Amino acid sequence: MIYEDIVRGIPEENIHVNESMSKHTSFKVGGVADYYIEVNDVAQLIYILKLAKKMKMKTFILGNGTNVIIKDSGFRGIIIKINFTHLNIEKGKIVAGAGVPVALLSNFAYRNGIKGYEFLSGIPGTVGGAVKMNAGAYKSEIKDILVNTTYLDEKYNIVKIENKEHEFSYRNSIFFKKNWIIIGSTFKIEKGDIAEIKAKRNEMSNLRKEKQPLELPNAGSIFKRSGDDIPAMLIDKAGLKGYKIGGAQISEKHAGFIVNTGDAKAKDILDLIKYTKEVIKKKYGKDLELEVIIL
């Protein structure tokens, strides 16, 4: 009955029933979602949201699955993948859909001789997720290049807000407080020298390869920085680098990362997070705050 209702507004090839979420998260873990649905436009998004509300089903908006841990028990409801992938230049600004990979946005800027996007080249998420969490690296953040964002509010109205209205802070924005869904964002254009942009991108890429465990499934930094406290330094100092629970391991390359060594379950990762927090609290009296979302 529910499937028949869904297929009335969503292309059948975009509907996945009892879908293993390990296919759709960078950690390569996660149980089965009742429905995993890809939406190609705002009309499809509104359709599935209204249907879920009518059916009293939970929903969760997923980008590239790079900053989320989905539990082994899976998700009872509908996980919605946003496929809004328009990317172009309009009226002197870069316009990007929420589903555009930020690495692609960085490449687009580079190809058009636009500077300021180099820091995004190795971040694996999408524009929507990056704006929501004010993603950043190497002393740059999304807030530095963003002009405005268009979103869908709780009443299915399409609304636009300017940069200052995002209430940006470290890995945070107004989108964590509101039940709004990002549709797309507009970004600044500042022309630069292509050779200099390329050199900066290469430098950041080499630093990532050298310092981050890119060869193993992970979700980036697990914990947020807090003031002068750098979680990776505390974890390393506590002697936890390389510590394993099941198939989950604190990276030997970067203590701020947890990696899936091949056969990890979500429970292994969550148990390792819990253990790490307990050790840091006991040794240094510090509370580590998660940067990843647990679903």
Image (tube, rainbow, N blue to C red):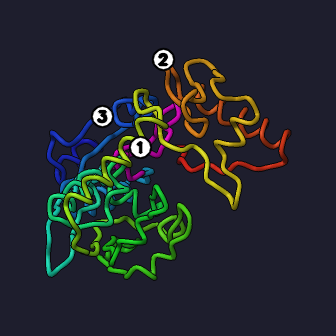
Which residues are the magenta region?
A: 60-80
> Left or right: where does residue 2 sit relative to residue 260?
left
Question: Which quadrant, please, contains the N terminus?
Answer: top left
Residue carrying label 3: 17
Mark 2 lies on a secondary structure that is loop
The stretch drawn in magenta includes residue 204? no
Where is residue 237, by image quadrant? top right
Q: Earlier in the sequence, mark 1 or mark 3?
A: 3
Looking at the image, tell me whether mark 3 or mark 2 is earlier in sequence order. 3
Depth-wise, is mark 3 or mark 2 nearer the camera?
2
Q: Residue at x 46, y 46 (%)?
A: 67
Q: Position of residue 25 (x, y in %)?
A: 39, 37
Question: Considering only order in the chain, which callout, 2 or 1, is on the residue closer to the N terminus?
Answer: 1
The nearer-to-camera label among 1 and 3 is: 1
User: Looking at the picture, how far across and down is residue 66, in whole percent?
Assistant: 41, 43
Q: Is residue 22 above or below residue 197?
A: above
Do tag 3 and tag 2 residues touch (Cβ < 8 Å)?
Answer: no
Q: Amino acid at mark 3?
A: Val
Q: Position of residue 94 (x, y in %)?
A: 21, 70
Magenta segment: does it hold 78? Answer: yes
Alpha carbons under labels 1 and 3: distance apart: 22 Å
| Amino acid at dot 2 | Asp
Q: Residue at x 48, y 43 (%)?
A: 68
| Quadrant housing residue 85 | bottom left
Q: Is residue 60 left or right of residue 101?
A: right
**Residue 263 - label:** 2
Q: Secondary structure at mark 1?
A: loop
Residue position for label 1: 66
Packing grade of label 2 (10 A; few <14, some 14-19, many >=20) is: few
